[in-house]
Image (spheres, rainbow, N blue to C red):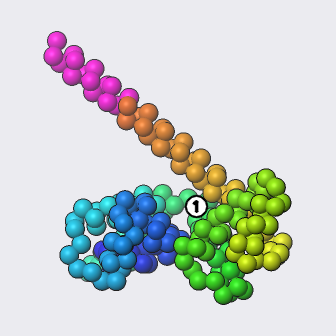
Amino acid sequence: MLKLMRAARALAGWEQSDLAKASGVSIATVRKIEQGAVGTRTGTAARIIAAFERAGLQLIPEGPDGGAGVRWREREMNEELREFCALENKIKGWFIYNLGREDNEELHDMIKRLSFELLDPGDQASLERLLAKWDLSKLPPPLVTDLEKLARMEEYIAIERWTEMEAQQRMAIKASEEDDEHEDREED
């Protein structure tokens, strides 16, 4: 299953560092596994697979019906998240094609910081410092629009997921309290 890591990261739009953060393993471990290291601990593999599953991906093992692969779990990958990943990849493509940037952690960080700075600029000098830091001149208006949209979408998705997590936590607490009440009644 770990042979699918690069494909799963690409589909999720993740860098190696994103996978490391999501799974709780080191970037060095992610790199070693992707380079074909053998002897990966079961717990490490389980944490990586769980991170992909939380992101809405399904890792499909090789079987009699076909080869191994990765796909979005339809019920977990909503249209907003799919649109967000497509827009992020479009923006990455612009920087790679037009400016010769490499698809790496620095590019991911640059896009994220620029998008949020454009959405809520604070002051023009701050934006100009960012542009100068990455040796960027004036950005084309369609790219600026896409970067602003990306930031709005990321905020919306984060709020939506936070709300879902809070609801799940409340349900878990309620279920635990009900279990405790049931145990108390059985003891009496």
Which image quadrant for residue 87?
bottom right
Whether residue 80 is situated above or below residue 60 in the rendered picture: above
Q: Position of residue 43 (x, y in %)?
A: 24, 62
Local crowd at mark 1 within 10 Å, few (<14), some, or many (≥20)? some
Residue at the spot x=48%, y=38% of the render? 167
Q: Amino acid at mark 1?
A: Leu
The residue sitting at the top extreme is: 188
Whether residue 101 is situated above or below residue 109 in the rendered picture: below
Whether residue 96 is situated above or below residue 138 in the rendered picture: below
Q: Position of residue 82 (x, y in %)?
A: 58, 65
Nearest the viewer among 45 and 139 is 139
Which image quadrant for residue 130?
bottom right
Nearest the viewer among 142 and 107 is 107
- Please tell me how many numbered marks the rendered image carries: 1
Please state if 30 lies on the left or on the right of 145 as rendered. Answer: left
> Which image quarter is the N terminus in?
bottom left
**In what element is the residue under mark 1?**
helix
Can residue 73 be seen here? The reply is no
Q: Position of residue 105 (x, y in %)?
A: 54, 73
Query: Which segment did they paint magenta?
Result: 174-188
- The residue under label 1 is 81
Residue at the spot x=30%, y=83% of the render? 36
